[in-house]
Image (cartoon, coloured by chain):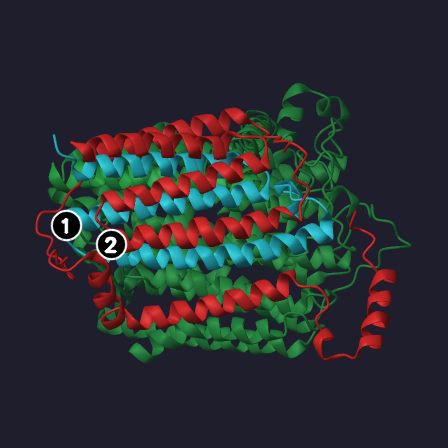
Amino acid sequence: MFEMVAFYIFSFLTIVMFLITVMSKNVLYSLSSLAAGMIFISAFFFLLDADFLGVVQIVVYTGAVMALYAFGMMFFDSIKDVKESVINPKITFVLSGLIALVIVAVFAAPIIADNISAYYPIHKEYGNIQDVGLVLFTKYLIPFEVAAVMLLVAMIGGIILAGKKMDVSITTMPEDEIDAYKHMIEETKDKRWH
Amino acid sequence: METYLYIALFSPLVGSLFAGLFGNSERKVFTGVVTSMLLGVSMISSLILLNYIFVTSDIIHVKLMDWIVIGNINIPYGFVVDHVSVVMMVVVTIVSTMVHIHSIGYMDHDRSFNRFFSYLSAFVFSMMVLVMSDNFLGLFIGWEGVGLCSWLLIGFWYHKKDQPTTKDIYNSPYSTLSPYSSISPSYAANEAFIMNRVADLGMLVGIFLIYWNIGSLQYDIVFDKIGELNSMTVVLIACTLFIGAMGKSAQFPFNTWLANAMEGPTPVSALIHAATMVTAGVYLIVRANEIFTVVPEVGYFIASLGAFVAFGAATMALVATNMKKIIAYSTLSQLGYMFVAGGLGAYWVALFHLATHAFFKSVLFLGAGNVMHATNDEINIKKMGGLYKHMKSTAIIMIIASVALSGIYPFAGFFSKDLILEVAFGTHSYILWTVLWITAGLTAFYSFRLIMYVFFGKENYDKEKVHPHETYAFVIASMAPLAILAMIAGFFKDSYVKLVTNTLPKLNIHVSPETVNILIAITSFIALGGIAFAVFVFIKKGGYFSDKLQNRFYFKTLANQYYMPHLIDKLINKPYLKLSKYCFKVIDSKIIDAIVDTIATTIYKGGENSRIMQTANLSTALKWMTFGLVAFIVFVVVYLNLIVRG
Amino acid sequence: MALILNDYLIVSTIIFIIGLVGVLRRKNLIMLFFATEIMLNAVNIALAAISKFHGDLTGQMFAFFIVAIAASEVAIGLGLLILWYKRYNTINLDSLQNMKG
């Protein structure tokens, strides 16, 4: 009973939030509503007995990813309203309507297989986190390691893409050279930034 | 004996290929000599075969190969030398050899000397194939081969321009009074070939009918079984085969090409249009005599048509001043005689007349060639005259040939022509006899009109430009055997009859000897009368038709060849040209090209329009992606639900 | 009336479609990224739902890895976006277009 209520409330909220994200003209509004939607999605995960996943969703998505987006906002001109010049909005609506219809119809009459046996069955006796840990570090070890390497690569890539001049290391320079360096940066400052 | 068969058959081919190697070089005498020698070899082989068959009365039959074996069709290819074909072989090879030797002298100023001999030998080879084949399809191959070679040879001087057709009767190419035999050599060649081709369609239909009903094309099998077919089929076969013969032998209405073929060199006319190609039609009738004896009505029609052509051609030769056309019309006339004989069932008589006619007509043409050579290619007889003292040998030979043509005893023409008249009388076809009798008189007249105009009388040629001289001695030597044969061939009649009646039916006409003698007397009388009229009127008046007569309607009709070329041009050429233009402009360009272009344009435009999908705009690409995704999902769902489940 | 798998799947689909509409509609590159995030999250919901209703952990593991990948993708995407903005001073989608079609 509670489950159903919770399900409907959270689904309603999620949908509204994401609609705002998609329809809004202000970048900051859509950013905020996206963050809110993420939190509500983690509520779904908790409903589905996927505790670890729900926690990860909040920490990673809402915490890290949204923070990243927020920092990214600092670079762009976010005060202006976004001008959406769609060439032919009718195509978009028609297409979207069609897609919606089709996919909902598809899932309303799903093709459900009968004989599905679980590869990694859920053990209800120990909690979800222990379960996930067991499977993650034994069966899914290699994807785990690979994901770690990928995150490393992404981090380095992010730093290089967004960083400023990095050929000079300020921390190892003596005082006066730091001042000279700062003057040089002031003069050659990128005039395109306003 | 088979060796002789192969030698006789293939030596002309070897000669033709050898001469063909030098086709583009300048004149080399040895091509002429080598080809003539190879033809001489062929002639000797044919004579040996003649002797062999005469003595042993044996038939030589060789099968070369299994030619067409597809499914139920089995047509082997072979050659047969029996009594009929050996006679034809001998005639063809003798005349060809003499013509080859004559051409060495006649064509000595021509630039394409080597090419001429290559074509001429190729023609002889095709004619040998035609005559020696043992099945209808081999005959057809030879038939087409001679048609092709005659096209090559008539159009030998293909670079001559077209002459325009005018109303002026002395200059229009459609008139026999003009210096042009036809619009141009290439036009005449095309006309001959196309007319032959149209007639060959009839022959092909006949061959198909034979194969369909009998199942084989070999002569012996066909003639065995022809009696079993129902009479309508046999009539149809006979008629269609005769249509083919009509084309080759220039019977009405396929006759205009023969006179126009005089645009080719004179040796060509001597070989092709006197002795060999035009007699292929007669050979077909003689060979297929067993088919024609089953349906005598068709035979009677053939005879009537032959008589009609004989008379018509003779009338057209009366007024012509184009020397070669006169001789061509006389050929046409004599072909009519042969068809009368063939139609009335006297096949060996037709063959006999074919042989004698080949001798004297070819030598007449060769002599005409000598005259033309002497007078700088002049062809109008009224512009010659008094050439006797300059060209005695040629004159004598031509007079001998004309006497033989008129059918005066003891020359060869008497024996064959009189036989035909006797056959006509004996089968109670008195109308045919009368027509042929009048034609005999006309023949004698116009032959000697030609002789008188050319060799006797006032000298009408331009004395500064023309220096008439006799030609080389070897040319006269080549004409001599033919002239001699024209004189004595008649005396071989009895041995000839004994030879060919092994294959051909005997004559069963009963005419009492007194009637025969009366007929001979009447015929000789009109022939001699014609000759006398020609000679004496010329000596008295110097010409035959006064100017008043020349303006009359019937003179003009005869001079314009009964307006047949004009009719053919108006009724067939022009509408066909219009049809061709219509087919090209409307059907080909607008419909077929349009269809092909549409297919190409559709593909091209389809590509052009699909290219719009390829924008670099990410938004558009994403839209296309979702569209594709939806389509794919729909397809999968439909497939799984309807096809797999349902 | 207990919840069945279908309900979760329908919700997931609706969210996915919202994300799809955003992808189609948005011309601002950052908004495009937001819509992509929405789609990824919708898929996560579906995976987790299926995992629960079949008693299998595989769905949750897959969702977990999707989260990791999405995070790194955002990092790189934003980096590239910053570079683009520094060069062209606009983040309109149409400015990416070099070809004329």
**Which sits in the foreground, B342 or B239?**
B239
Chain B, chosen colour in render = green
The x, y position of residue B366, in whole percent, is 62, 59
The x, y position of residue B43, in whole percent, is 44, 72
Residue A109 visible here: no
Residue at image point 48% right, 52% down: A65
What's the mark number on residue B397?
A: none
Quickly name the residue at label 2: C59
Q: Residues within 10 Å of mark 1 (few under 14, many from 20)?
A: some
Q: For marks 1 and 2, give the CA distance.
A: 9 Å
Q: Is residue B102 left or right of residue A174?
A: left
Q: How crowded is mark 2: few (under 14 residues within 10 Å), some or many (20 or more)?
A: many
Residue B369 visible here: yes
Mark 2 belongs to which amino acid? Gly
The x, y position of residue B59, in whole percent, is 23, 68
Quickly name the residue at label 1: C54
